[in-house]
Image (cartoon, rainbow, N blue to C red):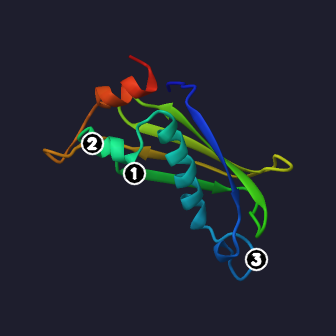
Amino acid sequence: MNQSSHKAAVDILVPFHDIDIMEIVWHGHYAKYFEVARCALLESIEYNYPQMRDSGYAWPIIDLRIRYIKPALFGQTIIVTAAVTEWENRLKIDYLIADKKTGARLAKGHSIQVAVDMASTSMCLESPKVLLEKLGVI
C-alpha cells in the first residue's frame, strides 16, 4: 500500500434532517459526509470532479465501505477526514469521522474509484498521469 500526505478535513454540524426516529444520524448520510470530505481533498490537489471531467476521465466509485463505531447526533459537530492511501491503479481514500469536541471515533471507511477514459468508456488499468501529477508523485 502506498502512503500519501494528501489529506483534508471538514467540520460538519449534524442537521436535524439527517437524523432518524432514534434521534441519531441515519446510516446512509455517512456516505454523504465522506463525499463532502472527498471533495475537499480533491479540491486541495486541484483535481475535483470538474477537473477530472476536463482531463478526459470519469472516476466512478466501485467500492464503498463504512464501519460504524458510535452514533452521530443532531447538533453534534463532527470532523470528517479524508486521506489518499492508494493511487497507482486506483484511487483509494480512507475516511474517519470523529466528534470534534472529544475526538471520539464515530465511523471509518474507505472508497475506491477507478479511472474510466471518457472517450472510449474503457476502465484504465493504471491511474492516468494527470492524477499522479496532481498528487506530486511524478
In this picture, is 126 found above or below 95?
A: above
Q: Position of residue 20 (x, y in %)?
A: 68, 78
Amino acid type of the residue tagged 3 in the rendering:
Glu
Q: Residues within 10 Å of mark 2 (few under 14, many from 20)?
A: few
Q: Position of residue 22 (x, y in %)?
A: 75, 79
Q: Position of residue 116 (x, y in %)?
A: 25, 44
User: What is the C-alpha distance between the residues marked 3 and 2?
Assistant: 41 Å
Residue wearing tag 1 = 61
Q: Is residue 35 left or right of residue 116?
A: right
Residue wearing tag 2 = 54
User: What is the C-alpha distance between the residues marked 1 and 2?
Assistant: 18 Å
In this picture, is 130 found above or below 19?
A: above
Q: Nearer the viewer, mark 3 or mark 2?
A: 2
- At 76% across and 57% down in the image, what residue appears? 77
Q: Nearer the viewer, mark 1 or mark 2?
A: 2
In this picture, is 84 found above or below 129?
A: below
